Amino acid sequence: MTKKLFIRSSLAVFVCLIFGFMGAVATQTGIASWYPGLEKPWFHIEEDLFSSIWILMYVLMGIAAGIVWSKGFYHKWVKTGLYHFGFQLFLNGFWFLLFFALQKPLIALIDIIILFIVILFTIRWFKIVSVPAAYLLVPYAVWVLFAIAFNFEIWRLNS
């Protein structure tokens, strides 16, 4: 691993974890009051495991972004991939705010579906620049599919 790759990956992981921290702050509002009273689907997982998986996803995302960034931001495909990455990161953080803090599962569901689509585009652009970086986002895409199913069921069961 080159020094440039290490620095850029570390910075990208840090930025992703900041978004994760902001999501955790938004989550605390709903977890304390609203969330415990909801009817949950059979595939519900405990909050600690849910949080741990998100942390792992943020680390993988950051490493992937760092790999792409290390290829040189001057390159058109790198810029395109990182712009998509930034947009999906924004949508990711916004989901926590919509779902937990604002307690709007239907709007959060729309957000997370759009998030999944943008993740697929991000994977596509990352794959042009770096196949390993694209593959690092696949677990995240799968996890977001799970979150879509979970979000949908929370909305369906509690509407």
Image: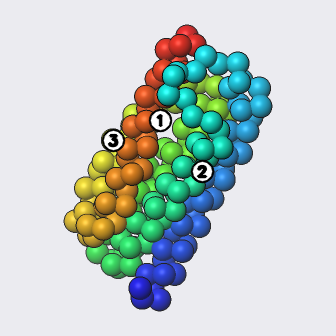
Report the colour scheme. rainbow
Identify whether 7 is placed above or below 39. Answer: below
Label 3 amino acid? Answer: Ile
Q: Residues within 10 Å of mark 2 (few under 14, many from 20)?
A: few
Give the residue at mark 1: 147
For the N terminus, the image quarter is bottom left
Direction left: furthest residue = 128
Give the residue at mark 2: 52
Q: Nearer the viewer, residue 84 or 8?
A: 8
Distance CA(mark 3)–CA(mark 1) = 13 Å
Q: Residues within 10 Å of mark 3 (few under 14, many from 20)?
A: few
Residue 105 appears at what percent x and percent y?
55, 24
Q: Is residue 80 visible?
A: no
Direction bottom: furthest residue = 3
Q: For the point 52% across and 62% down, which residue is it?
A: 59
Residue 5 appears at what percent x and percent y?
43, 81
